[in-house]
Amino acid sequence: MLKIQENLSNVKEEIINFATSVKRDPANIALLAVSKTKPAGAVLEAYQAGQRLFGESYAQEAAEKIQEIRSQGIRDIEWHFIGPVQANKTRIIAEHFDVVESLDRARIAKRLNDQRPPLMPDLRVLIQVNISREPQKSGIAFEELPNLLDFIDSSCPRLQVAGLMGIAENVRDKSEILPQFQALKDAFDDLCRKGRPLTVLSMGMSDDMAEAIAAGSTEVRIGTAIFGARQYHV
Ligand SMILES: *Cc1c(COP(=O)(O)O)cnc(C)c1O
């Protein structure tokens, strides 16, 4: 029972150490606890240890978990969708999430915009960029960012672009990872300089947190290091 609490405090300590070692203020790095495939009980354990930001990748599974947790009167969790967004899941995502980090297509943006319930606040979104340039990975190419942003500006009033998200290549040789994160940071800074009010640069997972923080991440997405290894039943 105490394991999740202990893992959480270890991860927070690591964030502090990595940030300090590159002279960054750890307060500028948010921790998203990635609870995909984990039961509501695991989320509640982390919640009781003070965690408030949670990330999920499977829309249907997440919606059930979110409802179960809300039915216990817990309403101050911020839910982030971080998985690939399928067109037939946009409604359930628009109805349950506070942030979508994995937006990478105009058609999906429009659906999320149109399906966001009127009484909910605007949906915050991050644009996912394919920073590793692997063909099988989600995310748009850097070159496509301006077009997608223009489309959202002109056609999606219920979406608020809050930043960028990237997943580095899963490689042992960590020296390949830092340049991928740095390229996303450059794109982020460039958009900020052009006047876009971006605040979230989501990069870094359990295995590449140090590189992401060194490159300027403002939010790390951590699953395994908090909840343990995942078992997939499907
Ligand atoms: C699963 C997932 C994570 C968490 O990965 P860990 O290696 O378990 O920390 C982070 N980001 C995304 C987009 C994910 O799908």
Image (spheres, rainbow, N blue to C red):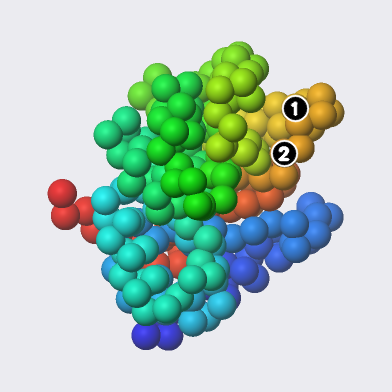
- Residue at 32% from the left image edge and 30% from the top image edge: 87
- Residue at 47% from the left image edge and 21% from the top image edge: 106
Q: Is residue 45 above or below residue 34?
A: below
- Nearest the viewer among 62 and 154 is 154
Q: Which mark is residue 78?
A: none
- Nearest the viewer among 180 and 76 is 76
Q: Is residue 70 above or below residue 192?
A: below
Q: Residues within 10 Å of mark 1 (few under 14, many from 20)?
A: some
- Residue at 80% from the left image edge and 55% from the top image edge: 24
Judge whether residue 173 can be spotted in this image. Answer: no
Furthest toward the left, the residue is: 234
* Cα separation between marks 1 and 2: 8 Å
Image coordinates for residue 133, horizontal then vertical, percent: 49, 21
- In the picture, residue 21 is in which quadrant? bottom right
Element under disc 2: loop
Q: Is residue 44 above or below residue 79?
A: below
- Which quadrant of the rendered structure holds the N terminus? bottom left
Furthest toward the bottom, the residue is: 2
Q: Please say if the residues under marks 1 and 2 sit with CB atoms less than 8 Å apart.
A: yes
Q: Which residue is mark 1?
A: 191
Image coordinates for residue 97, horizontal then vertical, percent: 45, 52
Amino acid type assigned to the residue bearing label 1 in the image: Leu
Image coordinates for residue 116, horizontal then vertical, percent: 45, 42
Amino acid type assigned to the residue bearing label 2 in the image: Leu
- Residue at 63% from the left image edge and 25% from the top image edge: 153
Q: Which residue is mark 2?
A: 198
- In the picture, residue 190 is in which quadrant? top right
